[in-house]
Amino acid sequence: MNDTPAVPQGVDTSAPHSARVWNYWLGGKDNYPVDRELGDQILRIHPKIAVDARAGRAFLVRTITHLTAEEGVRQFLDIGTGLPTHQNTHEIAQALALESRVVYVDNDPMVLAHARALLTGTSQGATEFVDSDLRDPARVLERAGELLDLERPVGVSIIGTLGHVPTMEEALDLVRAYVDPLPSGSFLIVADAVLPEEGTATEALQEWNKEAALAYRGHTRAEFASYFDGLDLLDPGIGPSPLWRPEPVEVGLAPDTDMYGGVGRKP
Ligand SMILES: C[S@@+](CC[C@H](N)C(=O)[O-])C[C@H]1O[C@@H](n2cnc3c(N)ncnc32)[C@H](O)[C@@H]1O
């Protein structure tokens, strides 16, 4: 049984929303019957989707940890934040470096309603939420610049979100629009779905696009790799996200997932 949360102002519970269905697959409670219905429908077609969602979050944790602990990054821009989970970007970064600053960006009213939970920055560090369409990078960067020093390196993370941008061309332009103005030593973290041409993942995607408020577009491996053009890829490069600098495990293998990941450094 999933306790259904009260409906915050502006939240539409008549159609499934990406952040809320994603939250359902992650095991969260910030979702409504309409989200769970589509979530279950997709799970029946393609049970691996829940693994994909978890793989994306785990990748976020490892990459933010790496950039903070090993690369000295102290500022992050988390685009397509989603609903809070038990390890959000500012918690990961500020646990390692208290002074880290994090700006979150999302345009889902449910995410906005939960933004307060994300804004528990430490006194030295600071966290901000920008309620904006990511397809307006000029506005997002202007707002982000109120907290972040955009003359200094920034880690930009976009997890499970670029597939929502209608065309690959626009998604690429957006990535460039976010990374180009940032100084050398900035990083781009991306995780998104790289899908085979046929199979249950493709069927699940068709079902999603019939029902959900916001369509999704899978990537070919080459399309995914193109997000990092002009950047220096950190080892081990691009591939299934669980293989990006995995933590040692006592038992078992890395999860099988279509959620690819990569991290690039701006030269
Ligand atoms: C699949 S969820 C991923 C959430 C989170 N990054 C994670 O990995 O758990 C995609 C998120 O992108 C957000 N999103 C999609 N299109 C957006 C847009 N045009 N502007 C801002 N946010 C958007 C959705 O609201 C949702 O929270």
Image: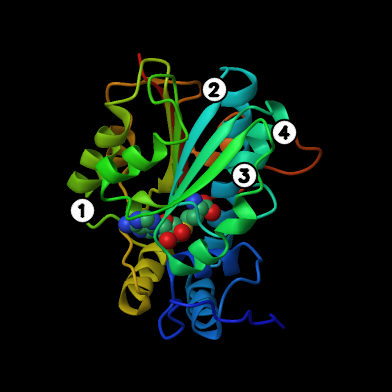
Viewer-nearest of discs 1 and 2: 2
Say which element carries label 4: helix
**With respect to residue 100, does 250 lie above or below?**
below
Residue at 50%, 68% in the rendered image: 110
- Tell me if 167 is positioned left or right of 112 in this view: left
Residue 42 on image: x %, y %: 48, 73
Mark 2 close to ligand 1, CB under 8 Å: no
Query: At label 2, which amino acid type do we have?
Result: Val
Please give the label number shown on residue 58.
3
Report how far apart the C-alphas of labels 2 and 3 lie in the structure: 19 Å
Q: Which residue is mark 1?
A: 167
Query: At label 4, which amino acid type do we have?
Result: Ala
When asked about the image quadrant of residue 190, the answer is top left
Viewer-nearest of discs 2 and 3: 2
Label 4 crowd (10 A; few <14 / some 14-19 / many >=20): some
Label 2 crowd (10 A; few <14 / some 14-19 / many >=20): many
Label 3 crowd (10 A; few <14 / some 14-19 / many >=20): some
